[in-house]
Image (cartoon, grey):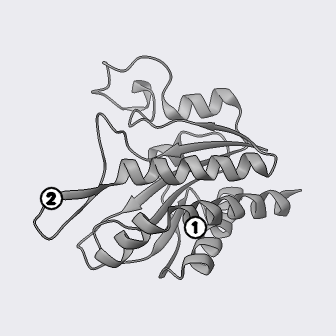
């Protein structure tokens, strides 16, 4: 199986959500956490026999899809690269953020009643079981660029809330456990479609 892994956001242009320490300084960035988890997911999936391609960029879809302001970036966007590589599945890995109080894991898909919905549920179950995070469920989000402009089953994994102290501690100290759970979810999905 060919798995396209997209660590959320970008270390140069858009770091995504952040966690701040007691003094108000940023001590954890979404782009860094997503990259660390994604790198480990790639390692686990390759060990399981999957072919993986990893790309981190905030340039997600071509300007023809209504995106602008990315003229300084050359080459294919994330969704174009995944489509041209003919991935079997697309997994975008993120950290959620809200109000500092919200906690838990959710996995987003284009439609619950689809292969993407099945993939999302497999990953959601594995993360919640392995890490004991609050189960926020699988959510339909057809408007998300990485779900709308990919031609294969695609999910966006919101691992935990980076702006919540308890969830941020998990993201900082349990990256390998998140990665192993996501990889198991992908292989569970692979078994379900064979």
Q: Residue furthest front?
A: 173
How many neighbours does mark 2 have within 10 angstroms: few (below 14), some (14-19), or many (20 or more)? few
State the image quarter where residue 190 is shown: bottom right
How many neighbours does mark 1 have within 10 angstroms: few (below 14), some (14-19), or many (20 or more)? some
Q: Earlier in the sequence, mark 2 or mark 1?
A: 2
* x, y percent for residue 114: 69, 59
Mark 2 vs 1: CB contact within 8 A: no
Identify the residue position indicated by label 1 in the image: 177
Q: Residue furthest right?
A: 194
Quarter of the rendering occupied by the C terminus: bottom right
* x, y percent for residue 8: 43, 47
Considering only vertical position in the picture, is 164 above or below 28?
below
Mark pair 2, 1: CA separation: 26 Å
State the image quarter where residue 88 is shown: top right
Q: Can I make out residue 120 in this image?
A: no
Image side of residue 44 versus residue 18, left or right: right
Please state which of residues 15 and 110 is positioned toward the viewer in this rendering.
Answer: 15
* x, y percent for residue 51: 75, 39
Q: Residue at x 56, y 46 (%)?
A: 39
Please state which of residues 131 and 68 is positioned toward the viewer in this rendering.
Answer: 131
* x, y percent for residue 158: 46, 63
Considering only vertical position in the picture, is 125 above or below 112?
below
Q: Residue at x 29, y 75 (%)?
A: 165
State the image quarter where residue 80 is shown: top right
Please state which of residues 100 and 84 is positioned toward the viewer in this rendering.
Answer: 100
Dot label at residue 25: 2
Q: Secondary structure at mark 2?
A: loop
């Amino acid at each position: 199986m060919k798995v396209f892994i997209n660590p959320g956001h970008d270390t140069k242009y858009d770091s995504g959500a952040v966690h701040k320490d007691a003094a108000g300084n940023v001590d954890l960035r979404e782009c860094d956490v997503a990259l660390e988890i994604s790198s480990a997911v790639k390692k686990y999936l390759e060990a399981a026999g999957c072919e993986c391609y990893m790309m981190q960029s905030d340039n997600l879809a071509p300007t023809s899809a209504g995106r602008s302001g990315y003229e300084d970036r050359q080459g294919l966007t994330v969704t174009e690269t995944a489509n041209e590589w003919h991935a079997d599945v697309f997994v975008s890995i993120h950290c959620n953020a809200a109000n500092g109080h919200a906690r838990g894991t959710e996995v987003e898909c284009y439609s619950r009643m689809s292969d993407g919905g099945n993939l999302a549920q497999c990953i959601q179950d594995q993360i919640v079981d392995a890490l004991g995070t609050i189960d926020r469920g699988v959510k339909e989000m057809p408007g998300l660029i990485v779900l709308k402009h990919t031609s294969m089953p695609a999910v966006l994994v919101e691992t935990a809330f980076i702006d919540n102290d308890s969830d941020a501690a998990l993201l900082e100290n349990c990256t390998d456990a998140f990665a192993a759970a996501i990889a198991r979810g992908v292989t569970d999905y692979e078994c379900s479609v064979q």
